[in-house]
Amino acid sequence: MSQLQPWENEEYVKYTLWFIFACVIYSIIGFSWGALMGGIHEFRHFVDHRLHGNLIVRAHTHINLLGWVEMAIFAAVYYIVPRLVKRPIYSLKLVKVHFWTHNLGLIGMVVFFTTAGLVGGMASTEVSPAEVEALVKPWLRTMGIFGSLVLLANCIWAYNIFMTCRKPK
Ligand code: HEM
Ligand code: HEM
């Protein structure tokens, strides 16, 4: 049997595959979301015409971009970089932190973009625009906290890739 290369660590391969599985799952959710949003007249009308209803489109956008697109890119970069530089990844622990932080941040962003859109859109027929703003604000703030987690995850990823590529002393 041929010997495993240092970058073919079992745990590393597992996490790289998890990025791919997550990408597939988010793509199914994101594409279905788009199909329902475009196909159901009442849904389309809600997101296009109710106050803050478009935040539900932001949820669709971000599940596709941060889920389907970014997850695929992360998996590809984790696969390619160690092979290019012929070294294992700098920190396997940071790969795991990246995976969980990104997923948690992304799910939180999508949940709270949607909540803010639903709360705003439903309230807009009952109360004044100023009251709608006040109702939506805390949900958007929470979305921002989860968004910051996504940003943190990206920085962790960038650091790990940079350290992997850096020439050892
Ligand atoms: C089967 C797949 C998809 C369907 C059916 C779909 C459907 C839709 C629909 C109906 C809207 C417009 C909602 C509205 O404002 O009335 C929309 C918006 C959007 N979608 Fe998708 N989508 C799909 C996949 C994707 C993917 C893969 C991405 C990105 C990678 C994406 C990115 C966006 C963006 C950025 C917008 C917002 C455009 C804007 O604000 O003007 N969508 N999508
Ligand atoms: C740290 C992660 C991110 C946060 C917190 C974030 C936050 C936001 C917010 C708050 C908006 C709405 C702006 C508005 O309607 O006034 C927005 C729009 C948008 N973002 Fe992001 N974003 C993030 C990452 C990304 C990434 C990585 C992409 C692309 C790969 C992206 C693509 C877009 C697009 C295309 C729009 C406008 C179109 C739409 O949603 O309809 N975002 N983002």
Image (cartoon, rainbow, N blue to C red):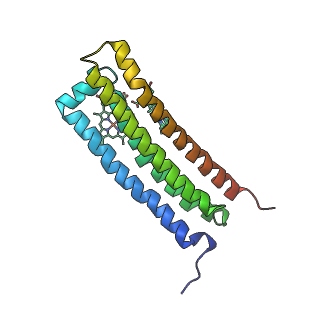
Judging depth in this view, the residue of 83 and 17 nearest the camera is: 17
Residue sitting farthest toward the bottom: 1
Measured along the vertical axis of the image, is residue 134 above or below residue 160? Answer: above
Residue 28 is situated, as x and y percent measured from the top left of the image, at 31, 50
Q: Quadrant of residue 94?
A: bottom right
Measured along the vertical axis of the image, is residue 122 above or below residue 5? Answer: above
Residue sitting farthest toward the right: 169
Identify the residue at horizontal 33%, vertical 32% (top origin): 56
Judging depth in this view, the residue of 80 and 47 nearest the camera is: 47
Position of 52 with respect to 147 (left or right) is left
Residue 57 appears in view: no
Measured along the vertical axis of the image, is residue 151 above or below residue 128? Answer: below
Measured along the vertical axis of the image, is residue 16 above or below residue 102? Answer: below
Residue 47 is situated, as x and y percent measured from the top left of the image, at 28, 27
Residue 132 appears in view: yes
Identify the residue at horizontal 45%, vertical 35% (top origin): 143
Position of 84 with respect to 123 (left or right) is right
Residue 55 is situated, as x and y percent measured from the top left of the image, at 36, 29
Identify the residue at horizontal 66%, vertical 50% (top origin): 159
Judging depth in this view, the residue of 92 and 34 nearest the camera is: 92
Residue 154 is situated, as x and y percent measured from the top left of the image, at 57, 45
Position of 160 with respect to 125 (left or right) is right
How many badges with numbers are in the image?
0
* Quadrant of the image containing the C terminus: bottom right
